[in-house]
Amino acid sequence: MKDFNVDIYIKALKVCKYFTLEGVENLCKRYPNNNYIKLALKIKAKNQAKD
């Protein structure tokens, strides 16, 4: 992330809270231009790898 935006990060955390990894992937396919959904996918995948 070249530009760290707190608002985008907070939106991404909210998406991670309410959706599963599959749900976030579906959102990413449906809305490919939303940066916070892409960030949520990265966060969710990283957390999934830890478990």
Image (tube, rainbow, N blue to C red):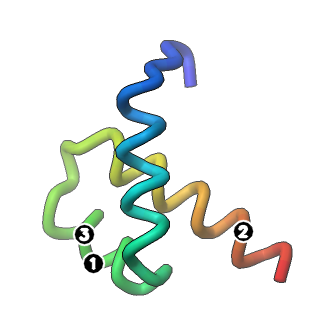
Q: How dense is the environment of label 2, judged by Cα within 10 Å: few (below 14), some, or many (20 and up)?
A: few
The disc placed on residue 47 is: 2
- Which residue is pictured at 42% across the width and 49% down the height? 12
Q: Is residue 10 above or below residue 23?
A: above
Residue 5 percent across, percent down from the top left: 44, 20
Numbered-mark total? 3
Going by the numbered disc 3, the residue's amino acid type is: Leu
Establish if 3 lies above or below 19.
above
Q: CA distance from mark 2 to mark 1?
A: 18 Å
Q: Which residue is mark 1?
A: 26
Do residues under tags 3 and 2 come within 8 Å of each other at their CB atoms?
A: no
Q: Residue at x 52, y 18 (%)?
A: 4
Under mark 1, the amino acid is Asn
Picture layout, residue 12 above or below residue 15: above
The kind of secondary structure element at disc 2 is helix
Residue marked by disc 3: 27
Q: Reading the chain from its start, which is encountered first: label 3 or label 2?
A: 3
Q: Is disc 3 placed on a helix, strand or loop?
A: helix
The residue carrying pointer 1 sits among few (fewer than 14), some (14 to 19) or many (20 or more) residues within 10 Å by Cα, namely: some
